[in-house]
């Protein structure tokens, strides 16, 4: 008997999920073994840090998954988080209550994601071009906002008070679990994810069925913004400072890697939210495993980067080859 959220998946995608599940379990076993041999380490402490540490990545990746379903992409997710975090920091400096700061951070991420969709729809420019430009523009916008709004802005905003850090430290695991349940249930029983997959497979076929491809893409960016707002909130409130110039550096590549590693076709038309969750967890656990193995920080960055580029490159190659074979038929 096939579970509802696996029933629509291809055999190859199911195999990817099995591989990732096995890989995550092996990495957890490796980390557990090393914590047993290290008196200063605790496996339970490691598990308790899992939610706060991995929540921003998986939440943003869940949002991006729907966009990639349609055959588009958003390369500005990290930069959007920077703007949202900067808005949070500015409101904190003006002594707004935590709830107001949280709401503004979330709303900023959602609005900028929708702005990307509007630009794509109005200008009829591919999403990769619009969001690639946004990657640089939004980071510049964040610095400009901080400079204009704050006197003697030193490049960072120090956030004091436990109440302002609760989403990233105390609530991150619950927020992540809630988002995961919503994503899996929606994919299992909702119609929209399947329409996004249809859009990614063939826009022409969607039009013949009376569907509006532009509206489907806009909807994907809206849902992405809902998840991205949670990612921005958990990422911004994790640390003691907000540095617009350094916040979420390289975040976009990690998010794309989590989606692609989970089996979602970078060209659209195939994918799984469960795969994205497993892919994001795998990337995090690989980093932790290298840490326990004693690799230097530079080596960990090199291996992590090579893994991400290798996975994305291999996925592009395999799906391009499959597409060419399908055209030859």
Image: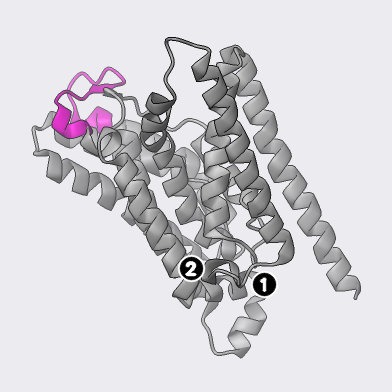
Q: Residue at x 52, y 53 (%)?
A: 130
Residue 207 lies, with reference to residue 225, above or below; the image says below
Q: CA distance from mark 2 to mark 1?
A: 17 Å
| Magenta residues, start to end | 145-165
From the viewer's perspective, tell me whether residue 14 is left or right of residue 148. right
40 within the magenta span = no
**Structure colour scheme:** one colour
Quadrant of the frame with the N terminus: bottom right
Q: Is residue 312 left or right of residue 237?
A: right
- Residue highlighted by disc 1: 201
Residue 112 in sight from this viewpoint: no
Q: Which residue is mark 2?
A: 187
Q: Give the side of residue 230 with respect to residue 186, left or right.
A: left
Please tell me how crowded label 1 is: few (under 14), some (14-19), or many (20+) other residues with Cα within 10 Å. Answer: some
Q: Nearer the viewer, mark 2 or mark 1?
A: 2
Say which of 273 and 106 sits in front: 273
Tell me where residue 237 sits by quadrant. top left
* Residue drawn at x 70%, y 42% as measured from the top left: 311
In the picture, the quarter occupied by the C terminus is bottom right
Tell me: residue 280, above or below residue 188: above
Question: Would you say 149 lies left or right of 67 here?
Answer: left
Q: Residue furthest right?
A: 328
Element type at marker 1? helix
Q: Quadrant of residue 300?
A: top right
């Amino acid at each position: 008997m096939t579970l509802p959220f696996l029933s629509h998946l291809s055999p190859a995608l199911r195999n990817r999920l099995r591989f990732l599940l096995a890989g995550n379990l092996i990495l957890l076993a490796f980390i557990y073994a090393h914590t047993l041999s290290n008196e200063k380490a605790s496996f339970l402490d490691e598990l308790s840090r899992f939610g706060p540490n991995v929540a921003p990545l998986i939440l943003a990746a869940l949002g991006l998954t729907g966009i990639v379903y349609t055959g588009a992409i958003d390369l500005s997710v990290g930069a959007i988080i920077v703007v949202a975090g900067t808005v949070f920091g500015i409101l904190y400096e003006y002594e707004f209550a935590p709830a107001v700061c949280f709401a503004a951070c979330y709303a900023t991420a959602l609005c900028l994601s929708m702005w990307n969709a509007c630009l794509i729809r109005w200008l009829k420019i591919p999403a990769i071009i619009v969001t690639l430009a946004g990657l640089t523009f939004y980071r510049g916008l964040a610095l400009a906002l901080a400079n204009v709004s704050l006197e003697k802005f030193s490049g960072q905003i120090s956030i004091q008070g436990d109440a302002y850090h609760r989403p990233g430290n105390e609530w991150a695991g619950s927020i992540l679990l809630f988002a995961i349940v919503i994503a899996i249930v929606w994919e299992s029983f909702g119609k929209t994810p399947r329409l996004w997959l249809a859009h990614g497979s063939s826009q022409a076929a969607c039009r013949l069925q009376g569907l509006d491809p532009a509206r489907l893409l806009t909807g994907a960016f809206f849902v992405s913004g809902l998840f991205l707002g949670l990612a921005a909130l958990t990422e911004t409130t994790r640390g003691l400072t907000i540095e617009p110039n350094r916040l979420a550096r390289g975040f976009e590549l990690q998010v794309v890697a989590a989606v692609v590693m989970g089996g979602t076709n970078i060209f659209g038309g195939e994918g799984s939210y469960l795969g994205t969750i497993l892919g994001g967890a795998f990337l995090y656990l690989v980093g932790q495993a290298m840490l326990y193995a004693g690799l230097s920080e530079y080596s960990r960055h090199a291996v992590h980067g090579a893994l991400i580029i290798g996975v994305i490159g291999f996925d592009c190659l395999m799906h391009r080859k499959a597409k060419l074979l399908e055209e030859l038929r």
